[in-house]
Amino acid sequence: MKAPAKIKSLDPQQMQFVASFIERGGRPTDGPSAACDAGYAENEKDARRAAAILLSTPAIVDVIKEDAAARFGALTIAAVATIADLCENGPPSVRLAAAKEILDRGIGPIISRNAVVQASMGLEELLAVIDAEDSGKGSD
């Protein structure tokens, strides 16, 4: 993953702290170990104090937030792709559940929340038609 753009605002020791903090999992309890890794402390008491100071430094917080947002964005893309794949390729009950997830979460283009849609067939009937079309494609 690409380094956060704001990391350039940190000195090398702060960069080491952030890298270690993120590598260890990015939880508040990872701060003292990351502080030791970066050379801010040699004992637990000093490490906890250093971590508290470092994790309240705006520049460090910005870098950590930027990294978390990038990771979350990448995971969101993977999650949407997984749901879309299940919607297209899963067995009918899984496809139905995936379709409901997509609609419930508003994933994809929404024309209007007030749109009126008239369906000439039910969802299960539509899935049966899609299954029939899919099975016909394999015999070409």
Image: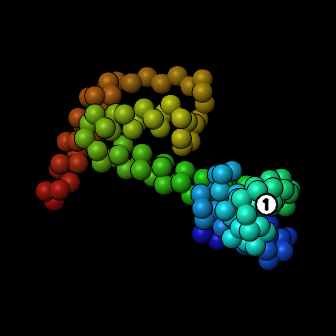
Image location of residue 43, percent across then percent down = 73, 63
Q: Residue at x 59, y 35 (%)?
A: 111
Q: Outermost residue toward the left?
A: 139
> How are the residues colored?
rainbow
Relative to residue 123, is residue 80 depicted above or below? Answer: below
Where is residue 59 shown, x and y percent of the image? Answer: 84, 61
Residue in the foreground of this view, choosing between 71 and 46: 46
> Is residue 62 something that shows in the picture?
no
Q: Give percent across and percent down for residue 138.
A: 17, 56
Asked which quadrant contains residue 100, the reply is: top left
Horizontally, is 34 left or right of 97 in the view?
right
Q: Residue at x 33, y 38 (%)?
A: 95
Q: Amino acid at mark 1?
A: Asp
Residue denoted by label 1: 46
Above/below status of 109 relative to 85 = above
SS at badge 1: helix
Q: Which quarter of the figure is the C terminus placed in?
A: bottom left
Residue 105 in the image, given as x and y percentages of width and height: 53, 35
Residue pictured at 76% horizontal, 56% vertical: 45
Q: Nearer the viewer, residue 134 or 30?
A: 30
Badge 1 density bin: few <14, some 14–19, many ≥20, Cα 10 Å: some
Q: Quadrant of the N terminus?
A: bottom right
| Left or right relative to 100: residue 137 | left
